[in-house]
Image (tube, grey):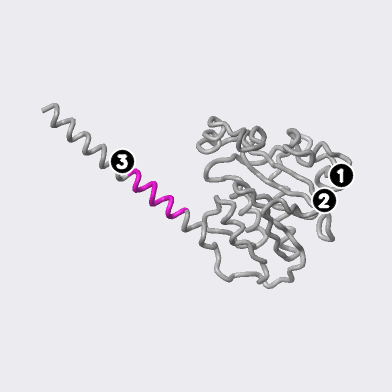
Amino acid sequence: MKNANNSVFIRLLYKFLDYFFGLVLFSLMLLIISAFLPRKWGNYSQNTCDIQICVSNTGIHTNIILPTKNNIFDWHKFLSIGEIGVDTAQNYNYISFGWGDRDFYMLTPALSDLKFSTTLKALFLPTPSVMYIKGYQSIPRNLDVKCIQVSKNNYLQLVEYIQDSFQLNANGEKVRLGNGHTINAGFYAAVGNYSILQNCNSWTAAALRKADINTPLWDGLSSAIVLHLRDSCN
């Protein structure tokens, strides 16, 4: 009787595992398909597009690159551009914005520094977020960068979303948390918690949608965001 009960238990266990891994595989397939599907089909605004924005893809993270100053908005009025990193002598022409898990961003300058505990927390627990800011003299060519044109109004919507992502202290000031991994970068406290459902690429996609830019149905992958990047006036 004991052997019979064990046999039934093993069969039930195998059946459960079959269902479980089948569900996981099905979910992964849905996510992959969703990464290739756009949120909208041919529904673009008809405004004049004459302002350039860029998105960089590191293979894991995406960052939004904007001019530090144009005839629409001047980031110098919002951030101390010269104090982003330790290289304070630079007068940057472009600035990039990224959002993500605070510990993962700040404690993992390279994949070789990746820790299992940090990754586990970032994936499965809501964790504090951070803004990662970098200044550039020109559009970086050592990264996978794609640039598009947007309208004035859509650009301002994008700027507002990025501004609202910064956490402010009691005096209404941005909170700089430390130097970045390069001399032209720095970390700032951010609004919101990071999770597997709200990651760095989800933030980028949400920012782009504010500018009426198409994004993938599932925006968790950096390459999927770049794939769907098109001028919002086409």
**N-terminal of the two: label 3 or label 2?**
3
Q: Is residue 41 above or below residue 165?
A: below
Numbered tag placed on residue 137 in the rendering: 2
Which residue lies at the image location 30% right of the left edge and 44% below the top edge? Answer: 18
Give the alpha-carbon distance from disc 2 to disc 1, as whole Å.
Answer: 8 Å
What percent of the width, then of the height, locates residue 38? 54, 63
Residue 218 left/right relative to 15:
right
Q: For the magenta stretch, what is the residue range?
A: 20-31
Amino acid type, residue under disc 2 in the picture? Gln
* Pointer 2 or 1: first along the chain: 1
- Residue under the image location 70 percent in, 40 percent down: 167
Cβ atoms under marks 2 and 1 closer than 8 Å: yes
Q: Position of residue 66 (x, y in %)?
A: 76, 54
Q: Residues within 10 Å of mark 1 (few under 14, many from 20)?
A: some
Picture residue at 74% right of the left edge, 44% below the top: 133
Q: Main secondary structure of the magenta part?
A: helix
Three-letter amino acid code of the residue under disc 1: Gln
State if disc 2 and disc 3 touch (CB < 8 Å). Answer: no
Residue 132 placement (x, y as % from top left): 70, 42
Marks 3/1: CA–CA distance = 57 Å
Q: Tell me the residue that label 1 is attached to.
A: 90
Q: Amino acid at mark 3?
A: Leu
Residue appearing at x 52%, y 45% in the figure: 197
Looking at the rendered image, the quarter that the N terminus falls into is top left
Task: Work out how far the residue at label 3 is from the one at label 2, CA to CA, in angstroms.
Answer: 54 Å
Instruction: Give the left or right position of residue 157, taking residue 215 as reference.
Output: right
Q: Which residue is mark 3?
A: 17
Q: Quadrant of residue 152?
A: bottom right
The quadrant of the rendering that contains the C terminus is bottom right
Q: Residue furthest top?
A: 2
